[in-house]
Structures are given as C-alpha cells and as structure tokens.
Image: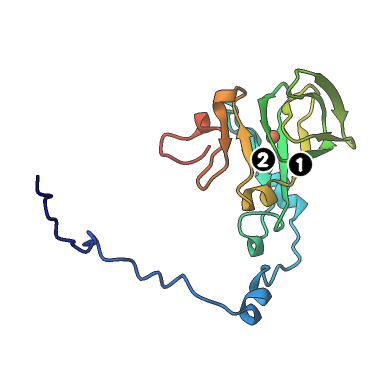
Amino acid sequence: MAKEETTWQPDQPSQPEPSFDWAVLMTDDEFYPQLLRKRVRPAKWSGKQVRARLQELANDPLRGADRRFVTLINKDCGASTSPALFIGIQIMNPGEHIKPHRHNSVAIYHITQGRGYSIVADSDGNEYRITWESGDTFICPPWHYHEHFCTGQEQAIMYVVQDMVALAELRALIWEEPAGPEHIRQVQEGFAPHRDTVHDDGGEG
Ligand SMILES: [Fe+2]
C-alpha cells in the first residue's frame, strides 16, 4: 500500500507576535548595578496618622475573618515596608476574635496597647496559649495556626513584623485561610487572604 504523501507547511501564527520590547539584553557591567533596587530612601510613618487610620478601621463592622490593620508602605520598595519585610499594625476592639489562619512567613508581634491572648498551634496539634498585654512581644513561627482574642476593656494594638515580602518575591509564600488543607494556596499576583470579606463591588474588604 502506497504511503500518503504530505506536503510540509510552515506554521502560520494565528496572531502577530508581540514586540517583546521589554525583553532586553544586558552585559554584566550593565546588569549588576541594577540587580538591587537602586534607591530605597529612609522612611517614617507618623504615629498620629497610624492611630487615626486605625480608629477609622475600628469603627467599621468586622466582616468574616477580616483583620483591621494598616501596612507601613515605603513606595520605593513597591507595596512593602522594606525589600524583604512587612510591618502591619493591627487593632482589635474589646471582645473581638481574629479567626485562625497560617502562613510560612514568621510573625513577630509587639503589643503597644491593650490585653488579650493568642492561640498558636503547630501542625501536630500542639497549642500554645499566649497571654499578652502592652509591652509584650511574642513570635508565631512559620506555618503555625494563630488566632487572637482581645479580652481587655480597651482596644488592643499590635505591631506585626513578617518576612513575607522576601518569600513572596521568591514565589514561595504559602497561605492557609480559613484553616483547612483545602485552603492552602501559593501566594500569587492578585492574592487576597480572605475572599469572604471582598465587597460586592469587587474591592478587597
Ligand atoms: Fe497571620
């Protein structure tokens, strides 16, 4: 039986190829000086402005697993405090409970106001109940569940430092919220930790 002859046809692209003019070549003389962000200026955030912003947040109803916090952003570093670190300042009203979640960034908490306690739990189910008051510092190690309770009469304010920016830059930041293995996600562009609080208009709550 004779083989069917086929005529070779070059691929015809269905769309014109993009210009890729953002893809360039650099020699090492050009590349290394640009390896790090060039200009990260010193920055300061006013405590007065932080407190005012936190009070605005504290007056809002708390939705779902939401947390009331502001992040200190140095725009020289994109959307982060420094090229590797995040600082968030969280406020809780008396009686509030922040539901458990976990991430593989470490979280270092320093309490500047109020009192309460946190439950920090490892993957084996070992739970640590950490009571805290103004002046205390505690650490939630990477990949430990954590939840917070404000038990005092006044609002609680906690400074939180995390290495999440470094992990996110390496595309290695992992998040689980709400608690449950089915909610484990790699943090990617557009990530929102708790979509149950997204507003109807599509904005993040
Ligand atoms: Fe957290």
Image x and y of residue 31, in percent:
62, 75
Q: For the residue marked with disc 2, what is the amino acid?
A: Phe
Q: In the figure, residue 13 lies in which quadrant?
A: bottom left
Measuring 62% from the left and 23% from the top, which residue is drawn there?
A: 179
Given the image, on which type of amino acid does mark 1 rest? Val
SS assignment at label 1: strand
Q: Is residue 100 visible?
A: yes
Local crowd at mark 1 within 10 Å, few (<14), some, or many (≥20)?
A: many
Look at discs 1 and 2 and give the one toward the viewer. Answer: 1
Would you place residue 179 above or below residue 14 in this image?
above
Pick whichever of labels 1 and 2 is earlier in the sequence: 2
- Decide: is 82 above or below 55: below
Residue 193 visible, this orientation? no
| Image quadrant containing the N terminus | top left
Question: In the rendering, at what x and y percent does residue 41 appear?
Answer: 73, 68
Q: Is mark 1 within 8 Å of ligand 1?
A: yes
Image position of 57 (left or right of 86):
left
Location of residue 108 in the rendering, given as x and y in whole percent from the top left corner? 80, 40
Q: Tell me what residue is drawn at x 40 percent, y 69 percent.
A: 20
Residue 118: name its quadrant. top right
Point out residue 43 in the picture as x, y percentages from the top left corner. 74, 63
Residue 69, numbered circle: 2
User: Around disc 2, counting alpha carbons within 10 Å, would you say few (fewer than 14), some (14 to 19), or many (20 or more)?
Assistant: many
Q: Is residue 31 above or below residue 202?
A: below
Q: Which residue is mark 1?
A: 160
- Left or right placement of residue 183 versus residue 165 in this view: left
Comparing 183 with 59, the one in front is 183
In the rendered picture of this protein, how many numbered marks are placed on residues?
2
Where on the image, by quarter, is ligand 1?
top right
Q: Residue at x 80, y 19 (%)?
A: 127
Is disc 1 in contact with disc 2, using a CB cutoff of under 8 Å? yes
Helix, strand or loop at mark 2: strand
